[in-house]
Image (cartoon, grey):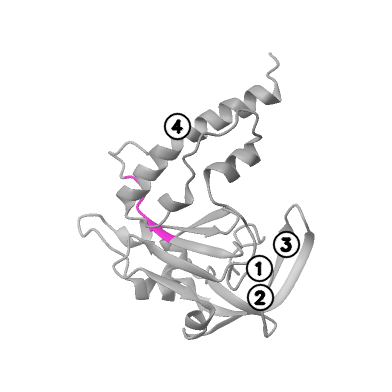
């Protein structure tokens, strides 16, 4: 059965239109601030491609970021700029990783300067449920870039006593030079073999509760 690209785009747009309200309600329930304003509820033309639909329904302009918000299931949400990030304890990491993106391939090596993501989360004070065993380790950390590229980490990866090599850093400089096209901050994870989770141009870091075994997924 052959389905035209136009029909597929109509189905995709319709799906996004129906799911955006569900996504907003789910994020509100998680205590994640600010995402409602990023959504566009205006009707979309029926001939949109999936990429055009993504840009229509969500504010994903891309480009360098100048600040990011850390929120979600935390007691002390906070917005970080370059100045406030540089005021945090410094972490320096030398890491070579494989780049496999659409614009470049091969290895990239550098000395990255920033602060541990774990330290920022410690300051934010993640909300915990005393009735759930090891609740901290099951939390999910979702990092979003200005182009809406997202990657997730578990707190179990980030806790130094558990994750070990996954000392995920929110970097603001490479080889002593402030980041430019990558925005003021990007993720660096020396525990990964490739740079797939190196979200650049960070605009948002969210702490999320995964559903419990007896709960239906959102």
Q: Residue furthest left?
A: 131
Q: Residue at x 33, y 49 (%)?
A: 28
In the image, which is nearer the foreground, mark 2 or mark 4? 4
Which residue was labeled with disc 3?
98
Which residue was labeled with disc 1?
182
Q: Quadrant of residue 161?
A: bottom left
Q: Residue at x 54, y 73 (%)?
A: 169
Nearest to the observer: residue 41 or residue 33:
41
Graded by Cα atoms within 10 Å as few (under 14), some (14 to 19) or many (20 or more), the crowding at tag 2 reads some
- On screen, 122 above or below 151? below
Mark 2 secondary-structure assignment: loop
Mark 3 secondary-structure assignment: strand
Which residue was labeled with disc 4?
18
Which residue was labeled with disc 2?
179
Alpha-carbon span between mark 3 and mark 2: 19 Å
Query: For this view, does 71 lie left or right of residue 168?
Result: left
Dots 2 and 4: beta carbons under 8 Å?
no
- For the C terminus, give its image quadrant: top left
- On screen, 212 above or below 130? above
Mark 1 secondary-structure assignment: loop
Alpha-carbon span between mark 1 and mark 4: 33 Å
Magenta range is 206-211
Query: For this view, does 103 lie left or right of residue 52?
Result: right
Whichever of labels 3 and 4 marks the residue nearer the N terminus, that label is 4
Dots 3 and 1: beta carbons under 8 Å?
no
Dots 1 and 4: beta carbons under 8 Å?
no
Dots 1 and 2: beta carbons under 8 Å?
yes
Residue 55 position in % (x across, y down) = 59, 45
Q: Residue at x 51, y 70 (%)?
A: 67
Whichever of labels 1 and 4 marks the residue nearer the N terminus, that label is 4
Query: For this view, does 140 lie left or right of residue 53?
Result: left
In the image, which is nearer the foreground, mark 3 or mark 4? 4
């Amino acid at each position: 059965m052959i389905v035209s690209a136009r029909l597929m785009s109509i189905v995709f747009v319709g799906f996004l239109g129906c799911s955006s309200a569900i996504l907003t309600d789910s994020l509100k329930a998680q205590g994640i601030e600010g995402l409602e304003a990023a959504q566009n509820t205006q009707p979309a033309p029926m001939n949109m491609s999936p990429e055009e639909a993504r840009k229509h329904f969500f504010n994903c302009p891309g480009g360098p970021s100048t600040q990011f918000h850390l929120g979600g299931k935390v007691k002390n949400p906070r917005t970080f700029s370059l100045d406030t990030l540089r005021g945090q304890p410094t972490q320096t990491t030398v890491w070579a990783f494989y780049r496999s993106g659409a614009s470049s391939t091969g290895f990239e090596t550098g000395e990255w300067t920033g602060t541990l993501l774990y330290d920022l989360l410690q300051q934010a004070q993640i909300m915990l449920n005393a009735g759930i065993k090891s609740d901290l380790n099951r939390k999910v950390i979702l990092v979003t870039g200005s182009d809406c590229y997202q990657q997730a980490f578990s707190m179990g990866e980030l806790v130094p006593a558990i994750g070990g090599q996954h000392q995920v850093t929110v970097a603001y400089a490479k080889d002593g030079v402030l980041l430019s096209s990558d925005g003021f901050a990007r993720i660096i994870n020396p525990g990964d073999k490739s740079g797939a989770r190196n979200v650049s141009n960070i605009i948002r870091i969210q702490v999320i509760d995964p559903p419990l075994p007896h709960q239906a997924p959102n």
